[in-house]
Image (spheres, rainbow, N blue to C red):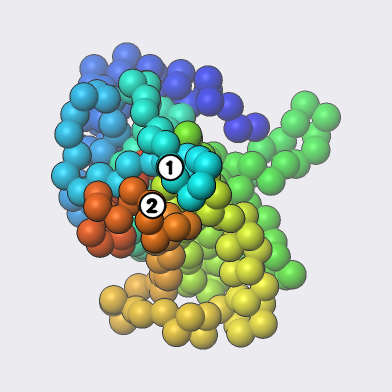
Amino acid sequence: LYSNSGYLLLAEIVYRVSGKSLREFAQERIFEPLGMENTHFHDNYAHLIPGRASAYFAAARRSYTAFLTTFDRVGSGGVFSTVEDLLEWDRNFYDHRVGGPELQETLHTRGVLNSGQEISYAFGLEVGEYRGTRRVEHGGALGGYRSDLLRFPDEGFSVFIRANIPTVPVASYRAVTRSECRQQRLDEVGRCRRPRTDGPCATAWPTRAASSAGPARHDRPHAARSRLPIRTLGYPPR
């Protein structure tokens, strides 16, 4: 079962076993080997992040208020990343550069309750099917931030959805994506680009504030390359 406290405890276990913070450990063992140069666990709220996309809440008369937080405990969340880096993250579920196939199998192992009932939640991933097609996904939210990663592993197709206002209908986008994938057999959805001919296909949907007058315009010159926090990436700190 998903538990914020459980992931915070895992971060503490990483520290006690390795002697390194989760930020240091993940940077050395996960992010750097995958070439994720713009990703980190944000364990210092005062740390400045170039190109950071701030989060907002919609207010009256098409205006916005800022989401401000000094919370910097990581484990259950606190990862800042970019669409480009998330593509490298997603590729690892296919080529197993970090962790190997054994870890990948463990990550996709669904939990079993004391009653013997199998649940859809695995190790930081929701695993199931959509109309007969294997589906893996995880979403998250913190303040005004929203994120979601939807993957159809048998088709090599993934979709990232990121937003910095809570009014963006992430769940609706996910539902539409599932439907379109079913109707168009995934590999034709959005005519997505394949940066590598031997890699999986990934479509990124960076979203802007709902109003063109919103404050997101001045601090996010290029939505696809701005850094947004990811509530959870589907990789528990182990």
Could you say where residue 168 lies in the image, as x and y percent from the top left?
A: 53, 54
Q: Residue at x 29, y 33 (%)?
A: 41
The quadrant of the picture occupied by the N terminus is top right
Viewer-side residue, 197 vs 96: 197
Q: Which residue is mark 1?
A: 64
Q: Residue at x 20, y 54 (%)?
A: 35
At label 2, counting other C-alpha atoms closer than 10 Å, the crowd grade (few under 14, some 14-19, many 20 or more) is some
Quarter of the image where one finds residue 200: bottom left
Q: Which mark is residue 214?
A: 2
Could you say where residue 39 lies in the image, as x and y percent from the top left?
A: 26, 45
Viewer-side residue, 13 vs 68: 68
Viewer-side residue, 158 vs 96: 158
Give above or below for 114 relative to 55.
above
Give above or below for 189 relative to 5.
below
Could you say where residue 23 lies in the image, as x and y percent from the top left?
A: 26, 30
At label 1, counting other C-alpha atoms closer than 10 Å, the crowd grade (few under 14, some 14-19, many 20 or more) is some
Labelled pair 2, 1 in contact (Cβ < 8 Å): yes
Could you say where residue 160 lies in the image, as x and y percent from the top left?
A: 45, 60
Q: Residue at x 30, y 62 (%)?
A: 224
Q: Which mark is residue 20?
A: none
Taking the image as drawn, is residue 141 in sight?
yes
Q: Amino acid at mark 2?
A: Gly
Q: Regarding mark 2 in the picture, which secondary structure is present there?
A: loop
Report the Cα–Cα distance between label 2 and label 1.
7 Å
Q: Amino acid at mark 1?
A: Tyr
